[in-house]
Image: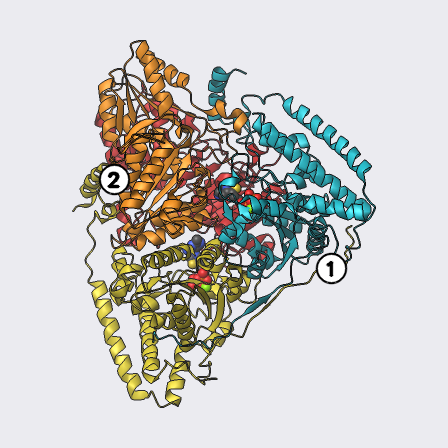
Chain colours: A yellow, B cyan, C orange, D red
Amino acid sequence: MSTPVPSSIEKPRYVAPPPLVYIEPSGKSNRDLPAQIDFDWLRQAYQHMSLIRALDKKAVALQRTGQMRTYPSCLGQEAVGIGTGMAMMDADVYVPYYRDQATLYLRGVQLKQILQLWGGDERGHLFDGAAKKDLPICVPIATQLTQAAGAAVALKSKGVKGAVVTSCGDGATSRGDFYEALNVAGLWQLPLVTVINNNQWAISVPRQMQSGTPTLAQKAVAAGIEGIQVDGNDVVAVFDAVNHALQKARSGKGPTLIEAITYRLGDHTTADDATRYRSASEVSDAWQREPIKRLQTWLHDHDAWDATREQSLHGEIKQQIERAVADYLAIEPAPVDDILRYQYADMTPALEQQRTWLLQRHGG
Amino acid sequence: MSTPVPSSIEKPRYVAPPPLVYIEPSGKSNRDLPAQIDFDWLRQAYQHMSLIRALDKKAVALQRTGQMRTYPSCLGQEAVGIGTGMAMMDADVYVPYYRDQATLYLRGVQLKQILQLWGGDERGHLFDGAAKKDLPICVPIATQLTQAAGAAVALKSKGVKGAVVTSCGDGATSRGDFYEALNVAGLWQLPLVTVINNNQWAISVPRQMQSGTPTLAQKAVAAGIEGIQVDGNDVVAVFDAVNHALQKARSGKGPTLIEAITYRLGDHTTADDATRYRSASEVSDAWQREPIKRLQTWLHDHDAWDATREQSLHGEIKQQIERAVADYLAIEPAPVDDILRYQYADMTPALEQQRTWLLQRHGG
Amino acid sequence: MGKDNNSNTHEVTLVEAVNLALRRALSDDPDVVLLGEDIGTNGGVFRATEGLKQDFGYKRVIDTPLAESMIAGLSVGMATQGMKPVAEIQFMGFIFAAFEQIVCHAARMRNRTRGRLHCPLVIRAPFGGGIQAPEHHSESTEALFAHIPGLRVVIPSSPTRAYGLLLSAIQCPDPVLFLEPKRIYRMVRQRLVDSGKGLPLDTCFTLRQGKDVTLVSWGAAMHETLQAAERLARDGIECEVIDVATISPLDFNTIKRSVQHTGRCIIVQEAPRNGGVASEISARLAETCLMHLRAPVQRVTGYDATMPYPRQEHLYMPATDDIIAAARTTLEGL
Amino acid sequence: MGKDNNSNTHEVTLVEAVNLALRRALSDDPDVVLLGEDIGTNGGVFRATEGLKQDFGYKRVIDTPLAESMIAGLSVGMATQGMKPVAEIQFMGFIFAAFEQIVCHAARMRNRTRGRLHCPLVIRAPFGGGIQAPEHHSESTEALFAHIPGLRVVIPSSPTRAYGLLLSAIQCPDPVLFLEPKRIYRMVRQRLVDSGKGLPLDTCFTLRQGKDVTLVSWGAAMHETLQAAERLARDGIECEVIDVATISPLDFNTIKRSVQHTGRCIIVQEAPRNGGVASEISARLAETCLMHLRAPVQRVTGYDATMPYPRQEHLYMPATDDIIAAARTTLEGL
Ligand SMILES: Cc1ncc(C[n+]2csc(CCOP(=O)(O)OP(=O)(O)O)c2C)c(N)n1
Ligand SMILES: Cc1ncc(C[n+]2csc(CCOP(=O)(O)OP(=O)(O)O)c2C)c(N)n1
Ligand SMILES: [Mg+2]
Ligand SMILES: [Mg+2]
């Protein structure tokens, strides 16, 4: 019974369209842009992405000079964060991971707070604006995803007219939490949009060493939900997919998984040295597809952008960043006993006693 | 930007054949049986299933009279376990869950050992035959699945010409471990066959409350592997699928997921009362599709079985079960200090001291 | 569940008290939602949630897919958005998949966000041995959770305390692990007024006063501890008996005051000996009561061994006799 | 990693000693396989596995998908089938997803099967604070694992002990959690002979002898503990310094003998105070040494608080001065 016989068992098939893209790497568009997208919108997207790139560069520089702790750059992935953020409304809830500074900025988090977080200060998580109710950045990979599903349960149950957006990396898709969250979202038709920032690397592990599937979007099939692959370096494609998914979610039509294909142009974090495990040519190839340049080209080609605008934008950004950095560097140290005060709603007797010891050792 | 616009985003599609079945509930076959299947094979399958059903009945009866602890009946699911076991070879490794007495029996585990396990005695896990290297039954749902992948890594790495078979319930497919195991198996093309005993219930939670997917087999798409749905009450279909998957696995062609559609005719365990949550009519409907009767009909219709054979089989089974029960009831209590002796390869000083206390309290 | 005519007073077991508290919380607070495996139609494998789905609907009493990590993750997400999830983990032996969410998120949400968000969830789980259940159904691993800052760990040992402590746990703005000693789920009935009133989560309960030796325990082992006190009393030995109830954060003062008074202490715990909560209590006594101790503080505990399968379970469990023997040794000690 | 000419002797840091031991184990035993996140081409985020994939190939040094539960589950399965997996969890803060596999399976396989199968795996994880890393990268949660029967928990505090203990851990037929104090990964260099010889997993190491007070610690805090002993010695106070090394199962005899000799004991632990390993040691001392104690056993520990983000991390960490202060109090105590 062990001699191989050709099996007559029929195989199932999965068929998917190619990744959604509006503005190609060359800066040309291959199809009409979505109706909601106009020049103003595109210029705004361009400005946001440029600001985030500048912030990112600054944060890395601060780290190199000892004024910042470990920082995860989002260089090259600005379109994922900005496209997502631009599709969100205040009533939505955002459940980020650690590389989501771009979306957090659009949610209303101050640039200073972003720096503060990576400067090693919990108070960066006080957030602002619509983000006041958003979850903090999540470091343990993929654990935010079931929380996002839980937030979606809350919105649904309270009848809030918003949806939850969460994001994770390509590496995160290997964790069971990723699947558990999608599965329950599909089952309960939760208002949940999950965006995979597929930047091709999980620290040193390339995308193709995370999963044997040709796409990450197809993992949605395991949850019975829609999975969309988009060019994650095209801010329009990201926006369109997230916007579609959000409208679906807000109108009770259930969750969506979006795989945004992009590339991590920088090191994993400032503690990493990517030259150890990937080639310079791969990175320079990837620079050909990065999101900001292509949008600039498109805008130029459509007479919606020029050198003057570019110059004044850079002036504004420089100012904004400088102010944020100055504010960041001026932050007063937190009270010493902050390390004890937020463990519980109230201090416990043991913590009161430990506060005495703490203050004896380290002053008020 | 929040006015719903019809999305132009194309949807991916998943297309699968209907569940594989050779012998229908009526006992008729709708197609030629696989070439390896002859009358002898079918009679053997019939005998094995009958034996397991009798064992099962006996175990429940023993529990009702206080001679057995909590026991998980496999009533109605005999074809899943027997079809799987008949496809396996000694060189393969089996990684069972708690409802897998049928396969374990075919692996060489003594009936007495099965009773002993559920009688609350670790020594039931000493196993026998090919099962000597198989894993113990696994109680924490789905946790056996990544272990099975690990066992498959070991076989592959040691060049053993066998494969690993593991199984789990429909409820288990909701756990992240299920996905993590399939994902790594697909990525590394491990010699692994995962059989889902989809008996429609996870205690009181029906299959359709575990996942929004129409099939469980399609979850294979998330791992980029083949997923096959079979009629789990047709021992031939189960065998054919597992055999196909095993041959594929043994020849280095990677893992397979098999969803065997069956029905849990009994309570979840002897501690459960299924009438609390499911209707009598659902159960009596399911009895129309159970695996033993249909095979008997087929054999009768093909003049391969008759009342005489049936009678002598029942005589044999009765004897076998009676012997197993007698052996089970005659088992000497384990030495008192067995509860300490197997924590580590050697006793630790603390355990030596605790052994003294233990023996003082409870004698040698 | 017996109910007096025309009153809100019930004669209930511990598990019925849990049910009453859940029912009360669901009635009083629309943000309370129960979730877990088999808690809906089936009413929970121990019937702790019996009738609640029927009365409050499937949106308030949610049967989840089978995934503990997901149950905890959902609860964290819900709690941050203004709900009060009360999750059930079917047995404490299955809580480990949820460990990461509990330890890394539930316990930290307030501290991480410096108070912007908090995580008022309750995770209920039956725990402990003595019911002859299969593997993983009988463990006592409360010490693992007691070590986690930001988490509260509460263990009732009687119907009235189960009711009052569970209500307080649900009202508490911090995440609470509420462990239910299943061995005594149905052991005794107590008269209970369904008043909606909670019991404090920051205090031990002194169940019996005495001057000779302090017996400290929690959960099902309170039963043997009280029995031991009873039997010792026949010999004129007066035990002070303390039910810790909230094992973390610990109300150590009550224990300290008692031991300073009696000079002797036995701590009874069903969990394995090494690294249990008894060790913490003993260490604190060593730091603060050395001058008052008239004999070494003793721990009566389980062995440093995995909970045996049913046939040998009784060998593992600390028994009344063990507590009595320890108390006698302590009393002879000096 | 300095290497003497023509010899097998190296001047190495702790992390280099780990690398040497792994290399040695891979060379000596074909069943040894390393697996984990980023351990291959990248050589591990701390370079503990640097060069090993290059030299032993991707089948012996396996970069896994990102899933800790899976890493542990694979290891359990591999171990039951005759391999010796040495898994890396990138930071101890990320071990919780693997908790269920470790606690419910690795630690129980031998007992559950009454010795038919066993589970000779090693899980390595860097742990502890002091390197200003992001959240979850600095915790010390060894006590959670020390409470689990069937598991060994080993923590080196010097390059030579890292080498010897890791080799023994890999040879050990029991599952071992091997925790590497990352703060001292590169703090000192030691001369080490790559002899392939292990160090015992059932004994504490007495690093310094003294008659006045016993200082007990493990991991990175050994550094401050030794510093404290050094400084106290200048004042004529002779400390006995014990590196527990294997915190479970604990070699309590060495500690007991020392404390019976000195009559005083300080236990230093970086982990939160409540329910830490220090509590267990203190409890055992209370049981066995009460008559010898000339002052209360004291614990110098972290706070009952989540490890702070980098800016306030230093406030959390127990410092040399704290140990000295505790020792002085102890000495004045009686
Ligand atoms: C549970 C867990 N395991 C490991 C880590 C360490 N770690 C941090 S980032 C990372 C890679 C994540 O890759 P991916 O999900 O692709 O996200 P990216 O960083 O590329 O955006 C790892 C392994 C972690 N933070 N959490
Ligand atoms: C991790 C875990 N959670 C919960 C349980 C309790 N439990 C035992 S069986 C079961 C249902 C399992 O259903 P399914 O996977 O469909 O298998 P079946 O019992 O139907 O064969 C549950 C929830 C468990 N054993 N393990
Ligand atoms: Mg990535
Ligand atoms: Mg089932």
Q: Which mark is residue C121?
A: none
In the image, residue C321 lies at what x, y percent? 41, 16
Q: Nearer the viewer, residue B82 or A23?
A: B82
User: Where does label 1 land, which residue?
Assistant: A7
Total marks in image: 2
Left or right of residue D201, residue C111 in this image: left
Label 1 crowd bin: few (<14), some (14–19), many (20+), radius 10 Å: some
Q: Nearer the viewer, residue A350 or D112?
A: D112
A186 sits left or right of C206 in the view: right
Which residue shows up at 39% across the image and 46% down it? Answer: C53
Disc 2 to disc 1, C-alpha distance: 73 Å
Chain label for disc 2: D
Query: On the image, numbered disc 2 is attached to which residue?
Result: D321
Q: At label 1, which amino acid type do we have? A: Ser
Q: For the residue marked with disc 2, what is the amino acid?
A: Asp
The answer to whether residue D27 of the structure is visible from this angle is no
Secondary element under disc 2, as helix, strand or loop, is helix
Question: Based on the displayed image, in which of its 4 quarters is residue A242 positioned?
Answer: bottom left
